[in-house]
Amino acid sequence: MSETQRQMILATFIHNSGAHPGGWRWPGAPAVDQHDFAHYAHLAQTAERGKMHCYFSGDSVGFPSISGKEAFAATDYAGKLEPTTLLGALAAVTQNIGLIATASTTYNEPYNIARRYASLDHLSKGRAGWNVITSASDGEARNFGRDANMDHAGRYARAEEFVDVVKTLWDSWEDGALLRDRENARYFDPDKVHELAHEGEFFKVAGPLNVARPPQGHPIIVQAGGSEAGRALAARTADLIFTAARSLEVAREFYTDMKRRAALFGRNPDHMKVIPSVQFLVRSTEEEARRAEAELLALVPEALALRTLSLQLGVDLSHLSPDDRLPDIPETNGGKWVQESIVHMAREEDLPIGVLARRVVVSRASFSFAGTPEQVADLCEDWFRKGGADGFSLSPNYLPGGLEDFVDEVIPILQRRGLFRTEYEGGTLRENLGLPVPENAFVADPTLGREPRMWA
Amino acid sequence: MSETQRQMILATFIHNSGAHPGGWRWPGAPAVDQHDFAHYAHLAQTAERGKMHCYFSGDSVGFPSISGKEAFAATDYAGKLEPTTLLGALAAVTQNIGLIATASTTYNEPYNIARRYASLDHLSKGRAGWNVITSASDGEARNFGRDANMDHAGRYARAEEFVDVVKTLWDSWEDGALLRDRENARYFDPDKVHELAHEGEFFKVAGPLNVARPPQGHPIIVQAGGSEAGRALAARTADLIFTAARSLEVAREFYTDMKRRAALFGRNPDHMKVIPSVQFLVRSTEEEARRAEAELLALVPEALALRTLSLQLGVDLSHLSPDDRLPDIPETNGGKWVQESIVHMAREEDLPIGVLARRVVVSRASFSFAGTPEQVADLCEDWFRKGGADGFSLSPNYLPGGLEDFVDEVIPILQRRGLFRTEYEGGTLRENLGLPVPENAFVADPTLGREPRMWA
């Protein structure tokens, strides 16, 4: 990263056929089969053509809990590819872009996650990242032997230990442990491979991992938590944080708070990047952009909008009319940050439920804007210069057009302004983000590791 | 499959840098980094050039339990890529070959496995398979919160239920459920998507899966169990069975028994393929082949051979001398079939431990042969015609040479004899194996499914 001009980080978060719930119906886009690899390969290659830092793949381990069968049938959330297998395939058809896959700490085991992401990092020669989620819905819980989700505090306590175990597993082979010394029959140096013998509140994991240390040391850790527990986890463990911010003010509050928290954990705040999630609709004129925005929103059935609002608030609003105001919302075990943002938005502008639902269904409380390429670039520059963002996570409304427009129309403006690079500088995602390789925990503290028990 | 001439199935089982423990040290092979995707891409493309049916990727979720630090350091078992992410990547660089990844039923959840393999099947357009293992070692158990492995019977009871749940999850979307009807805002037909509401001894899984039904209906189920419990599981659930057979007689016993068992479960025995695992060393003359065999064996340190014998028998033999005979072996919770085969071999030929160890370290009780291309082809034809095999799973001793030699020297002979095809006939692995698409369980029994609870 140059001293003379701070550079933006640009990522794209790919959500099925588009982040906008009307996106899959957009007449100008091809009718995408979300199970077709060619769809994703084109997107990753388009983002790479734009020199974007990373491609995110979102995930959940179940159906979204949208009530109402017909409202549900209008969503494209349900059928798609699993991220770690998909990103394995994308690694084979891209060269530079970072590949970030979402996986849950509530419904996985640390050893399995450590292996898959280490493997992705090797497959991609150092371009993997893990978006850590705790999974908020009861629908997901029911696929894993539970009747309801773990409570919010328990999920985050488990996530804290989970991430630590995974990072330590990634360190269980020191760099240079792999010898492949044919002459002396030493495939690896056993003194550089360590057992963790971890025993914590949630996990007991011996190790070592059966994958050598990843090229990045650790694949990039990504998080999106906005709640108190989410912020604490992200500030301590994450390299890259994306956030839902409905305004520059909200973005600045979050940005400032997260950098402060990182410093409290003894981290260099520059080594934790904050990128708000944004939805842009780009057209040559403001009028065209507004028209496209309205057309896209008209593709969302009203029932789906209202049911989605219920889902995001974690309460059933189906007994209310679209003209009613939002009642008091009890605390739930779902995603707290999105819930609080929506309630704040409703109260601040005194919005009827019907209007609130249409706004929320588009953006999930994150920032949505329709305008010309110059206006979008101005907005990005403004947030970037005013302490709201280290860059942005673009959620294209529909695909591939929403991503292509940004790459072809907006990125060249940012490049001309010197705010975004014109070529990948580093070989790994970590290098391209300007983040150092983490020190190996077993090298830092030689008393930490044990010799694997099976060697005795 | 033609009525006039029954055709062989040919697979290759890729084990790190080669199935032979001396393989990674073979001077004629390139020094492979097992974390380098290019290594595996070349192998899969070589097998595909030979029109082989499938590429298998073995796996374990931990280090092998070889005692003795220096013996262990001489193995290449420890550091490699995780199969499902690797096969995702291989799907992107191959067109026809089947891709079979190993995963454990003891250390995974059915919902996660169903998703990853459904995803691999979509990514590869119907070329995925799941090699079902139950994981036999305590070293693996210690990575997942346990002190020791589950007992053999418990592991198999869990595996039986696990496979059934995964297959039912694959059926939870009927074929044709995905509508993508933009005009009427129906992304899918909710009447064709079902909740399982499974509640069994080991698992409680609601469903539906959040991936549409795989192109093959079900990815191919592969198994290798030789024990009573393993045979029962395979006969009921597997499409493809590979087995360790040290002679044609053993292969015939297994083949006959498995076809009989399949029929007892009401299955068409032709729809369950049995392929013994074989290691071939191919040279232009018998003498060269024997010499190469001896050279390869000389690359295995004696300590590693003895420790590997201990591992495979599940008992510590380190107090014995190489000239001693094998003592009585108590029953363990490990892999029973391999253990029984080794004990039988030792008793039958009255082998000293040192000799037994060198033989076992090469082949794990499966069939190993060194000879000319014609001799190897003769042997394959003999087993195939005499009721020992539907085909073979080649474990190349070293890589890529062991695979290249088979593809370039042996397969053309089998093709000339009309025993092996010269082109892929079908589009999917299932079609290429001559197996029908399974009927959807929810279509077969409309009382089975429920409407997903979240839609109420």
Image (tube, coloured by chain):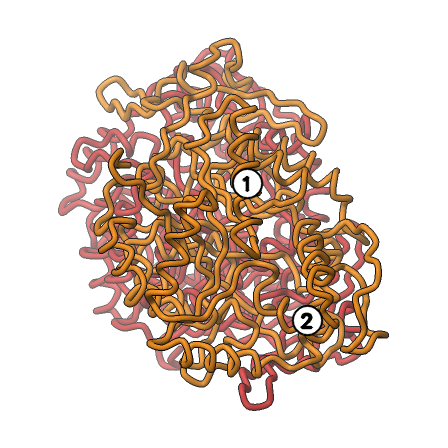
Chain colours: A red, B orange
Q: Chain of mark 1?
A: B
Task: Find disc 1 in the rendering and name its residue.
Answer: B112
Tell me what residue is drawn at x 40 percent, y 41 percent: A81
Q: Quadrant of the N terminus of chain B?
A: top left
Residue A161 visible (yes or no)? no
Q: Residues within 10 Å of mark 1 (few under 14, many from 20)?
A: some
- Residue beneath label 2, please? B357
Q: Earlier in the sequence, mark 2 or mark 1?
A: 1
Q: Are marks 2 and 1 on the same chain?
A: yes
Q: How many marks?
A: 2
Drawn side of residue A96 relative to residue A60, left or right: left
Residue A264, above or below A397? below
Report the side of A9 relative to B24 (left or right). left
Amino acid of disc 2: Ala
Q: In this rendered view, identify the residue nearer to me: B342 or A333.
A: B342
- Under mark 1, the amino acid is Asn
Residue B100, percent from left and from top:
44, 49
Query: What's the chain of the residue with tag 2?
Result: B
Q: Is residue B252 left or right of residue B44?
A: right
Where disc 2 sits, the SS reads helix
Within-10-Å neighbours for mark 2: few <14, some 14–19, many 20+: many
